[in-house]
Image (spheres, rainbow, N blue to C red):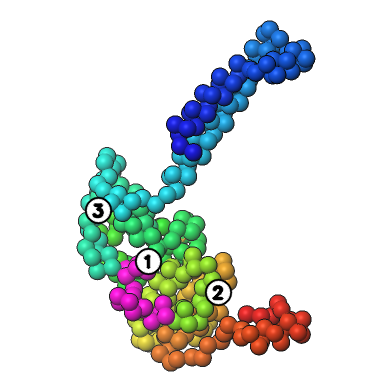
Amino acid sequence: MDDNQERKDFSSRESDLQLSVDEETLLDQLGISGAARRKFLGQSMAALLGTFAFNLLAKEQSFATLAASPDALFAPTAGVENAVQVLLKINGLTQRLEVDSRTTLLDALRERLGLTGTKKGCDQGQCGACTAIVDGHRVLSCLTLAASCDGKEVTTIEGLADGDNLHPMQAAFIKHDGFQCGYCTPGQICSAVALLQEAKNGEASHVTNDLRTIAQNLNLSDEEIRERMSGNICRCGAYPGIVAAIREVHSGRETALTWHFATDEEIAVALNEGKANEIV
Ligand code: FES
Ligand code: FES
């Protein structure tokens, strides 16, 4: 229903409040007359106004959640407070932005550049959903000011694939079922890609045993992978698949799938044996 129709309905309800013969009779039978009847009508109007305002507010809020049109994404932002000019090289493209100096990298990516692959989870550095790669290092983009990335190279999930060819880490996540709902996945994959670079650089983690013998091209154990990925939370609990995917790409050795879709025969056997819950 459009606003005009809604207003029409509202006005017609207003005139309805002149009351039909039946309603007049009912109010008479209830003994509501004179000042009491005017008060009753006034309260009915107030209730209608409240509903009308509530509907408008709900509509406004739902419009606010709609995606901006592609044309709007690069629109100059009129009257930016504390404006700073930022030059970013994002996924190989140089982008010049004028942003409020308090704008996070995450908001600049999502709201200004339309790169919505980087997800906003907690928005306070707790979940890792917003992980992006800046100059080869993973960062939590919700805690990183866009202005602090001036002149830097930013890679997001949109920049990992080479055309139609997925990044090996993306392909491994698919192969090893490293996601379910997928909300944390862009952050997981960016984190995993940067982790490979950390291993190449010989960067230690909290569980690295001997810091004195640390070398380039570290061979990461599953424990190391888990520790290094511990800032990326997956509420779906896809951790075994995530570790398997990273292990495969890190080692460079193809590993066997640890899961498969159940075949019709397997489903029939499981149902016969009363093990329907075990069907994957
Ligand atoms: Fe940045 Fe959760 S959104 S850590
Ligand atoms: Fe759903 Fe990780 S796949 S939160």
Looking at the image, tell me whether mark 2 or mark 1 is earlier in sequence order: 1
| Label 3, label 2: how far apart the Cα atoms are | 36 Å
Residue carrying label 3: 97
- Name the image quarter holding residue 110: bottom left
Looking at the image, tell me whether mark 3 or mark 1 is earlier in sequence order: 3
| Label 2, label 1: how far apart the Cα atoms are | 20 Å
Q: Is residue 117 magenta?
A: no
Looking at the rendered structure, the secondary structure element under dot 2 is loop
Q: Residue 244 carries which label?
A: none
Question: Residue drawn at (46%, 78%), measured in percent from left and top?
Answer: 173
Mark 2 or 1: the one toward you: 2
Asked if the residue under mark 1 is in contact with the one under mark 2, i.e. CB atoms within 8 Å, the reply is: no
Looking at the image, residue 152 sits to the left or right of residue 222; the answer is left
Place of residue 276 in the rendered image (x, y in percent of width and height, measured from the top left): 71, 79
Residue carrying label 2: 238
The span picked out in magenta is 155-171
Looking at the rendered structure, the secondary structure element under dot 1 is strand
Place of residue 146 in the rendered image (x, y in percent of width and height, measured from the top left): 31, 56
| Label 3, label 1: how far apart the Cα atoms are | 18 Å
40, above or below 56, in the image: above
Q: Residues within 10 Å of mark 3 (few under 14, many from 20)?
A: many
Place of residue 262 in the rendered image (x, y in percent of width and height, measured from the top left): 61, 84
Q: What residue type is labelled 2?
A: Ala
